[in-house]
Amino acid sequence: MKEKMIDNGGHCFQPILPLGCWTPYRNKKPGVARWLMRRYRKEIDFVLAALAIGFMLLAGIWMFLVELADVGLS
């Protein structure tokens, strides 16, 4: 039986029932920053989301105080 192949637009052909198209193995040791990003991805995402929500809350409070000062000065 002849195996059917497809071109996935990448650097390799893969079978119709793909087992994956793996990149060539590199002998370079991964950096510490990349390892930390992979290891603590969920924690980093949580902290960034919390900071974004906190900054939006502070900006809202600031805008409320500015509007309140404008009304008080009029």
Image: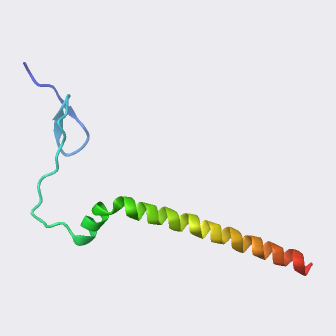
Q: Residue at x 29, y 61 (%)?
A: 38
Taking the image as shown, residue 35 lies to the left or right of residue 69, namely left
Taking the image as shown, residue 40 lies to the left or right of residue 47, namely left
Q: Residue at x 31, y 64 (%)?
A: 37
Q: Nearer the viewer, residue 34 or 64?
A: 64
Taking the image as shown, residue 41 lies to the left or right of residue 20, namely right
- Considering every residue shown, the one lying at the far bottom of the view is 73
- Considering every residue shown, the one lying at the far top of the view is 1
Find residue 52 and report its image quarter: bottom right
Q: Residue at x 27, y 70 (%)?
A: 33
- Viewport quadrant of the C terminus: bottom right
Q: How many numbered marks does the figure carry?
A: 0
- Considering every residue shown, the one lying at the far left of the view is 1
Q: Residue at x 11, y 25 (%)?
A: 3
- Considering every residue shown, the one lying at the far right of the view is 74
Find residue 57 and report its image quarter: bottom right
Q: Residue 23 placed where, x, y %?
A: 16, 50
Q: Residue 59 placed where, x, y %?
A: 66, 71
Whether 73 is drawn above or below 2: the answer is below
Q: Residue 60 placed where, x, y %?
A: 69, 68
- Viewport quadrant of the N terminus: top left
Whether 15 is drawn above or below 45: the answer is above
